[in-house]
Amino acid sequence: MPATLIVGAQWGDEGKGKITDLLAQDADIVARYNGGDNAGHTVVFKGQTFRLHHIPSGILYPGVICILGNGMVINPERLCQELDELASRGVEVSPARLKISGRAHLVLPYHIAMDKAEEAIRAKGAIGTTFRGIGPAYSEKFARRGLRVADMLDKEFPEKVEKALEMANRFLKNVYSSEPLDLSSTVQKQLEYARRLIPYIEDTSWFINEALKEGKRLLCEGAQGTFLDIDHGTYPYVTSSYPTAGGAMVGLGIGPKWVEKVIGVTKAYTTRVGGGPFPTELTDEIGERLAEVGREYGTTTGRRRRTGWLDMVALQYAVMVNGFTELALTKLDVLTGIDPIKVCVAYRLCGMETKRFPLSTASLYHCEPVYIEVPGWKEEISQAKNFEDLPPRAQDYVRLVEELAGVPIKIISVGPEREQVIVR
Ligand code: IMP
């Protein structure tokens, strides 16, 4: 069966872009189903580093069609910039190769202004959003007053933007005490972006389903990760979409019958950006080392990511809510030289040990990780091509994670380059 899902098993930034990039070689279509330009995928290709935000990394393969699904929120200005950047580096993206769902919602400048204003009001309880207007855009979608990509096709699009902007300006001024946005220049700019993007608009659910019926292979790329999911994550320190496997069905308009594999992507340790609980967080020199060796700085915001040990309680929960059929373990090389390595296998909460991820985010703050220690390795592993090339202690670490997760680890990434990967 032809659909494979790639889902973040942690708090995002697991290296999904690289895994998508690897599997895109055998795909006909690569589709994103959630989020917007809050995501950032770094792909190193022919010595060039590409930072993509809306567009899936599959775009670097000439034969692959990329889809921005209905579950996404699209910022027209930033998407046009992304197309320009790709073109400037020799990747021309024609409408035959990129299709944007008409049902996806638009992120407009006032969503960004609201995102900033809301974070300022939250003050100490700030989520630490990417300031890309994601929360406000999804809020409008669910309040049933958002603008969709298909509205760009409507000759009344300028009036629709103007009306939405007038309403937003009232909020910005009266509720958030923020500067209102200029009506005419904002409308004008959105019209320009619309002219540029119109050729790319498609009924992508129809397009994907037709392709699946023809036996084409679909790769669905989730943005963010399980613990940033609006329902299954550490609410309210989450994003406003569904990064989990179920989100792919809703966010692309396909049925579960097409899904063959659900690949969970996890780092060999843990990172998180922004606020919220993180039981295995390390604020010592090992945490610093993970950040520096792992280059743990956000692709979208440049923020230093918080770092910590691998959390198997969280990973087991991610396996459960996504139904992972396999795992991809990334950044194993970053653990080289750390000895011993700790792995969290349970939480201690109110004096009791538990292996269940807590229901309430408030109690997650009080969970103390229960660790086991395993010996580390010193040997360089970034050139390993086969599992057997890894030093025995690195092999043991992989087997331990696999055993605790209850699903096989089929892909191991040992460096940032495309070739630095072991497929088992
Ligand atoms: P928002 O998605 O910008 O609203 O941010 C909500 C939370 O999700 C914040 O903690 C962000 O740091 C986090 N977040 C959003 N997108 C990503 C991502 O692609 N990687 C990691 N964290 C993200």
Image (cartoon, rainbow, N blue to C red):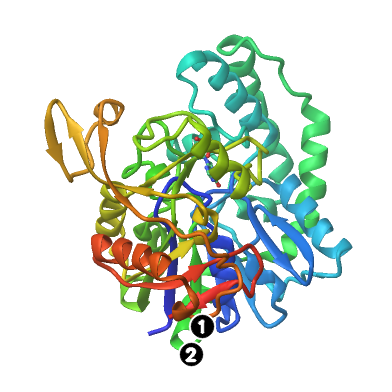
Direction from residue 128 to residue 327 in the image, left or right? left
Q: Residues within 10 Å of mark 1 (few under 14, many from 20)?
A: some
Residue 122 sits above or below residue 209 on the image: above
- Mark 1 residue type: Ala
* C-beta proximity under 8 Å, tags 1 and 2: yes
Residue 253 picture location, percent across and down: 43, 65
Task: Kindly indicate the quadrant of the structure image that contains residue 5.
Answer: bottom left
Direction from residue 97 to residue 262 in the image, left or right? left
Q: Quadrant of the N terminus?
A: bottom left
Residue sitting nearer the eye, 353 or 163: 353
Residue 32 picture location, percent across and down: 54, 61
Q: How many marks?
A: 2
Direction from residue 392 to residue 373 in the image, left or right? left
Task: Kindly indicate the quadrant of the structure image that contains residue 213.
Answer: bottom left
Residue 314 picture location, percent across and down: 30, 47
Q: Residues within 10 Å of mark 2 (few under 14, many from 20)?
A: few
Residue sitting nearer the eye, 306 or 153: 306
The dot on residue 211 is: 1
Q: Residue at x 60, y 64 (%)?
A: 415
**Which residue matches tag 2?**
214
Direction from residue 29 to residue 340 in the image, left or right? left
Residue sitting nearer the eye, 341 or 87: 341
